[in-house]
Image (cartoon, rainbow, N blue to C red):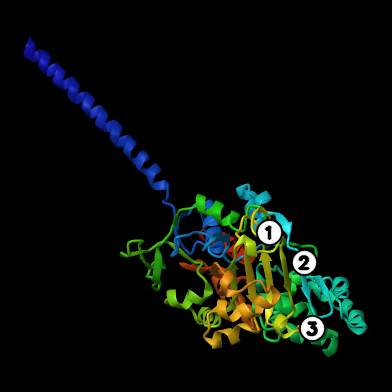
Amino acid sequence: MSNRSDRINEGRRACLASLAAGACLSATPRVLLAVEQIAPKPTALVIGAGIAGLSAAWELRKAGFDVTVFEKEDFTGGRMREGWMGPLYQFTHAVGVLEANREMFDLADELGIRDELEGEPFADTIENGHGTYPYTLDFHPERVARIPGMSAETRRRLPSLQADLDRIREAVDPCLLHTGAAWDDESLGAYYERVLGREAGREVIRYWVQPVCSAAGWPVYETSKMALLPWFSRQEARFVYPRGGIGVLTRKLGSLLPVHNNTTVRYVTPPGSDGRHTVHYLTPTFERRSVTPDIVVCAVEGKYLDKIVQDLTPKQRALAENTFFSKEAIVCYMLDEADAPAELIGGSYIPTHPDPVKAKTSYWFVTPGGTESGGHPPHARYALSRQETPAWQRSGRPIEEYCLPMMSRFYPRLTRERIRDIVNYTCDDLIYMPVGYIRRIADVLQEQERERRGLYFAGEYVSGGHTGAACASGRTVGRMIAAHWS
């Protein structure tokens, strides 16, 4: 009886096992099919955690890419951030933003920080030997006409500029200068002399255009007119200091994206048969490693482009070999409170000022420090004019020694004995944009837009010499890649 019962139970177990196996077999194809239909995320590696790289990474992540950002520095934000410079905590490069930076303000909206990116307008005056007048990045002919020393004939000719300003405002995005490549055919100096006549053109250049160009380090008679005319055309857009500081946008993006700091890209090799590039890099502990993502976005400074990427096309190489940066020479002399003024004092001057010391000076100021000076300690800041910078470089003297006699002329209480510390703020500044450079940008972007590829470029060197252009470049490239992969 027990044997029969055991056999029945064994049969039941076998039957149940068979049914279970059948159920599993019938279910397995459906389960596997469901898994197979969930495609892995495409991978993207962004090189550079400045505003261009962070903006591109943000767009790619929104589009479903598995994104990683490599940054060689120990900080995130590139030129759009604050940081400690000795005893000063301040902007490290970019100071403010123009309200015409549509992509940047739209991104701030997405991140919920628009009110922090908005801010107070930049207000400054400049002296030309006849008097002082407001100094901004827009260009209103009627405002320019009120510059002290402007001749009656020049004032009469100024309205003839308005038609070009209107056309450029309608057609060209100042944050994506390739949209104005068709007009990249003459320098700013040649343009104003052609439209206004030689004498009137030179007067406008001397009192308005050259001070703006000098602030960027751009020679008036070499710089493409499209480097500045799109900004001049935005006659209602103000230049503002963000309430949250210049780094408010990059800080937010850096907190939301996977940024690997102290990770240095050594080089990017040509694509394999699958179209993917291999990125060779050093970890923070200097281990040599490599990775082969689906997409690489090169958002480094343009001067490093041909040092990193091994397989540049002829048009890309032509752009890389003609990407140069101007030099900004600034020094800060730290003072004791007893040697500081009671209130902020300073001045700005045109590069052709009749006073030889003022002609060598872009601007200077001395701050008493404290809450009215943003919490900074008392100090004197001196910015050498761009025309004088090569003379300093040839001199071989430290910047603080070269500039001290001129700064002491403006503030006689500044002597060697009263200087408590020195902050050297000298650095590479903006990309140099001679006639033809914007057409080179357009050539590279046309190649990039044509079809899906494994390597893309983003940054000010393919958009324009300011943070708004770098942001627009990153966002545009991110959306382009998403479209290529859709």
* Kind of residue at badge 2: Arg
Q: What is the quadrant of residue 445 in the picture?
A: bottom right
Q: CA distance from mark 1 to mark 3?
A: 30 Å
Question: Which mark, by number, is residue 234?
Answer: 2
In the image, 443 versus 72, the foreground residue is 72
Pointer 1 local density, CA inside 10 Å: few below 14, some 14–19, many at least 20:
many
| Image coords of residue 304 (percent x, y) | 48, 75
**Compared to 446, does 482 lie above or below?**
above
**Compared to 263, does 433 lie above or below?**
below
Q: Is residue 207 left or right of residue 430?
A: right
| Image coords of residue 125 (percent x, y) | 78, 69
Mark toward the start of the polypeptide (1 vs 3): 3
In the image, 65 versus 305, the foreground residue is 305
Q: What is the quadrant of residue 238 in the picture?
A: bottom right
Pointer 3 local density, CA inside 10 Å: few below 14, some 14–19, many at least 20:
many
In the image, 85 versus 276, the foreground residue is 85
* Kind of residue at badge 1: Tyr
| Image coords of residue 210 (percent x, y) | 73, 80
Query: Looking at the image, which residue is at 65% across and 51% down?
Result: 116
Q: Which residue is mark 1?
A: 241
In the image, 264 versus 36, the foreground residue is 264
Which residue ends up furthest to the top in the rendered image? 1
* Kind of residue at badge 3: Tyr
Question: Which mark, by number, is residue 192?
Answer: 3
- Given this view, does label 1 or label 2 mark the residue nearer the observer? 1
Question: Which mark, by number, is residue 461?
Answer: none
| The N terminus: image quadrant | top left
Dot 2: what SS? loop
Dot 3: what SS? helix
| Image coords of residue 24 (percent x, y) | 29, 34
